[in-house]
Structure formats: C-alpha cells, structure tokens
Image: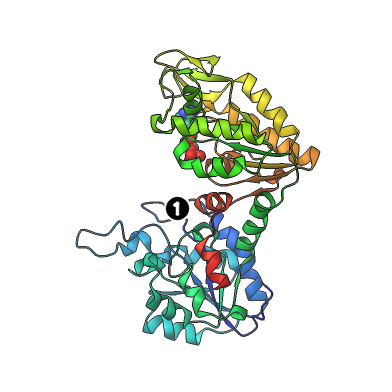
Amino acid sequence: MNLKFNNKKVLLRVDFNVPLDKETFNINDETRIKAALPTITHLLEEGAAIILMSHLGRPQKKKLEDGSINVEAFTLKHLVNRLTELLGVEIQFCPEVVGETATQMAAKLGRGQVLLLENTRFEQGEEKGDEELAEAMAALADIYVNDAFGTAHREHASTATVARYFDEDAKCFGYLLENELKNAAKVTGNPERPFVAIVGGAKVSDKMLLLDTLINKVDTLIIGGGMAYTFMKAQGGEIGKSLCEEDRLALANELVEKAKEKGVALLLPSDSVIADDFNNDANIKIAPSKMIDEGWMGLDIGVYAQNEFSSAIQSAKTILWNGPMGVFEMPKFANGTKLIAQAVAKATQENEAFSLIGGGDSVAAINQLGLADQVSYVSTGGGAMLELLEGKDLPGVKAMNS
Ligand code: AMP
C-alpha cells in the first residue's frame, strides 16, 4: 500500500460477498465489509477516488425462469446505505460493472469520492476470467488494489485477469490481503518450533492435501472431528455409524506411516463422546474411539483426548487450527472444540505462541466463543486460506506478480 494514490482513480477489488436477509435484503453479517474498511479509509486519506468492485453470491447459477439475472436478489445496491454509514462518505452506485454508464461515472469521480460498481458476477465473463471484460474494468482506473482475500483462489476477471492490465508500479494488495499472506507465511514458511497443527471437520477427503502438506512441516499433528473415525477404522477400530470414508482408509494408513517416518507425533482422539442419534437430544456416553457400539456414532472428542490435545497445544510455539473437533453446532457436542479453542488462546497469551485460526468452521467456533482477540490471527478466507496452507499459489496473488 505504498503507492502514490493522491488524485488517482483506484479500482479496489473487495470481498463484499455478505449474507443478506432473503426478504428485507438487510446485511446479516458485515464482517467482510468491516475487514475492507482499513484499506478504503487509507485510500480516502491519501486522496484517491475509489471504484469499489465485488461479487455477491452466485447470480449466474440462480437465474430467473426466463434466464435473466435475479437483479433484486443479488444487487450490490443493498449495501449502499450501510457502506455510506460506515465510511461517512456518500457512496455512488453504478448499475453496471463495465459499459458507458460505468465509464462516465468513473471519469467524473473526484478525489475522496467512492463509486460502487454492480455485482461483478452479473457479467458472464467474470468467472471465466474473460480478458475483454478485465480490460474494460482496468480502463476505469489508474491503479488496481486487490483486497479480496476470500476470492484470491479464483482465477476470475476481477480478481486475477484484471491485474495483468496494470503495470507493476500501478497495482498492489490491500491491507487485508497483505495481512492474510503475512500471517499464513508464519506457518508455511519457517515456523518457530514446536509447530502443532490441529485439523478437524467432517471429511478426510476435503483436508487430504492439507494433512499431507502439514506432515512435512509440523512436529505434532492433531486430528479430530468426523475425519478421525476414518483413521480409527483404518487401524482396525470399530466405529459404529460414525462418519467414515471407505475409499480413504488406505490413505489414512499412509498418512499414519508417513508421520512415523518423519518423526511427527500424530495424535488421534483416544476417546469420544458418542451418541445414538445425530441430534442434540440423543443419548450420549463416552467410549474409546476404536470401540464404538453398533448404532452409535462419535460426535465429539472425549475428556482424555481433550487433555492430551490441550497439553500438546501448551507446548507449541506455532499453532495452526483448521476445523472443529466435533459437531460444535449442537451444544452437547461442542465441548471438545471449546476446550481446544481455550487451549489455543492460553498458549497464545501465556507462552507467546503464534496461533493462526485458518479458515472454515474453526473461525466460526472461535468467534462464537468470544476468543478471537486472544489468538494471533483469525483468517477471513476459508477456501483461500486452505489453498495457501496446502502450499498452492493463489491466482489472485500470482496475477499481481506477472
Ligand atoms: P469442515 O467444513 O470440513 O471444517 O467441517 C465442519 C463440519 O464438520 C461441522 O459442520 C461439524 O459439525 C462437522 N463435524 C465435526 N465433527 C464431526 C463428527 N464427529 N461427525 C460428524 N460431523 C462432524
């Protein structure tokens, strides 16, 4: 963000993909808007004219019966009043992304003024990374700033292609994107040791690449959540009707072997809270995770596992957490996730460990528990953070360097 923005027109790609109330179109959660405010404020202070662009939802997939876009449901116009309030600057709205109106409104835009373009996904070419569309977007401004971390893993016109139409000294990342990359690098680069990663959530298949990448990096790998039962079964355990991916059993064993070879401590929950039904009113009991009765399922880690995981976390200097330890949406199965969140917060506060809450439902959990300000960094981008942690290049980042 150290370009000269004074009197420049800045095309700022943000992630304003916020959930809207289906009837009133009020914003249900404005976290993403607030995350973009530091960059917007800085640009205003520096004397820029800002052209904001974002996507909202999936309008191409949810067209009206006659095949046209459902403008009312997906227009960014719904954000104008709240944005005006938050910024204290009147937001002008352009009912298209590119075209004559957009060109005229952008041309008239002066220092300190803000223009919000319509939903980028109203354009057919957006998700295809269309060059003509990207070129037309680029023609609106002098400088391109990308602050949309949540969509940086998409090779779209407004997130990646457009960057190629700006010279190296006329494009940069915004504060949010820069911060996400900086914090991810603390675990993907040269983390302070011991490095403990905690991976949970529903499926092994979603986190396969992440687990494989982490085994080459960490000192301790903790696996909880639904995915742990595929490992239990692979090792000959009885898991009742717990989540299990039969086609990943061999892979689970390979990961266990790989951990042994690399000297990585792989911790699986030795006990579980098991239930006779997938709901909060089910009967529950504690059982060894490899001896779950028929008809029962593991929905949270047990007390022994909580203690074992917590003490591993206490020894860490770097912590990465991605995915809940159980079905934390139901209070009866939220304890494991809660205790792990508390252990991560404690290690951060008392041992000065660096802790990254890296995307997905662990972010929802840490926020729900009110512990977000007691960990080092909470990522705002689920899919994008997962891809970074898997060691992939993000198209939105790569395009800035080409
Ligand atoms: P993910 O998006 O992969 O991080 O998965 C998050 C989801 O995994 C949450 O909705 C949890 O309810 C679910 N989950 C966690 N543990 C279990 C479990 N033991 N059985 C079933 N689902 C689980």
Q: Is residue 118 above or below residue 217?
A: below
For the question of whether residue 370 can be seen, the reply is: yes
**Number of dots carrying numbers:** 1
Callout 1 environment at 10 Å: few (<14), some (14 to 19), or many (20+)? some
Task: Give the residue at the far left of this rendering.
Answer: 66
Q: How is the image coloured?
A: rainbow
Give the amino acid type for the residue marked by disc 1 in the picture: Pro
- At x 56%, y 47%, the residue is 359
Q: Nearer the viewer, residue 248 or 148?
A: 248
In the image, residue 150 sits, relative to residue 269, either above or below, namely: below
Measured as percent of width and height from the top left, residue 70 is found at 30, 61
Is residue 280 depicted above or below 69 in this figure?
A: above
Report the side of 247 relative to 39 (left or right): left
Q: Residue 284: horizontal and vertical position, in percent?
A: 49, 16
Q: Quadrant of the C terminus?
A: bottom right
Can residue 112 be seen in this snapshot? no
Ligand 1 within 8 angstroms of badge 1 C-beta: no
Picture quadrant where residue 43 is located: bottom right
The quarter of the picture where residue 364 lies is top right
Q: Quadrant of residue 346?
A: top right
Q: Residue at x 62, y 80 (%)?
A: 169
Residue 206: x and y in percent read: 46, 41
Q: Which of the image's four quarters has the N terminus?
A: bottom right
- Residue beneath label 1, please? 19
Q: Is residue 94 left or right of residue 398?
A: left
Residue 287 x %, y %: 54, 14
306 lies above or below 64: above
Q: Label 1, secondary structure: give it.
A: loop
